[in-house]
Image (spheres, rainbow, N blue to C red):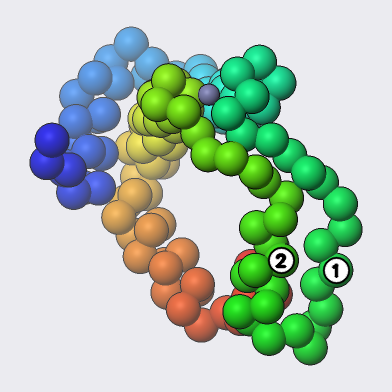
Amino acid sequence: MSAPTLQEFQSQVSELLLRHRSLLDVVTKFSQSNASVNRAVSKSITECGCIALNAKNQGFSEEMPLDQAHLQSKSHMEGELCEQCREIIRNEMGKNLFYMSAMCNLLDISLEDVVARESDKCSTLGWFNLT
Ligand SMILES: [Zn+2]
């Protein structure tokens, strides 16, 4: 499976967009698909059990070295996604991305540009500024 560029994906979505021309409709679908991603992740925890949450204070501090913060940040999640949950979550993320692209199309925003700008921000912002 070769990945299309973001530009190619956006054009693809644009061709399929006929049924969802209304911006309001797309905004609603985007929101629903986002909730579906969250629900799929929750189900991996509560129904499948392949991943578990062990949520507590992570004890970050501003002075903490990055590698130390990285180590501690992993302590919240145990296990890894089973193939079935991975497939479901990937599928929901795809739909979410579809409606994100559809919204980009309707608003004349380039998805590639969105990613490029965010990537640029990621490389200039520090670890604690990412929230
Ligand atoms: Zn699972």
Above/below status of 77 relative to 106:
below
x, y (%) of residue 56?
86, 52
Task: Name the residue beneath numbered marker 1.
Answer: 59
SS at mark 2? helix
Q: Which mark is residue 15?
A: none
SS at mark 1? loop
* Of 111 and 123, the residue lying toward us: 123
x, y (%) of residue 126?
61, 81
Above/below status of 10 relative to 28:
below
Above/below status of 45 relative to 60:
above
x, y (%) of residue 85?
48, 24
* Of 25 and 72, the residue lying toward us: 72
Q: Are marks 2 and 1 in contact (CB under 8 Å)?
A: yes
Residue at x 69%, y 35% (from the top left corner): 52
Task: Name the residue beneath numbered marker 2.
Answer: 72
Q: Quadrant of residue 59?
A: bottom right
Q: Label 1: how many residues lie within 10 Å, few (<14), some (14-19) or many (20+)?
A: few
* Of 57 and 130, the residue lying toward us: 57
Quadrant location, the N terminus: top left
Amino acid residing under circle 2 = Gln
Looking at this view, name the residue that lies furthest to the left.
2
Asked if residue 17 lies left or right of residue 74, the reply is left
Q: Specify whether residue 39 is in view.
A: no
Amino acid residing under circle 1 = Gly
Q: Specify whether residue 50 is in view.
A: yes
Residue at x 71%, y 21% (from the top left corner): 46
Asked if residue 26 lies left or right of residue 113, the reply is right
Residue at x 73%, y 50% (from the top left corner): 76
Asked if residue 86 lies left or right of residue 43, the reply is left
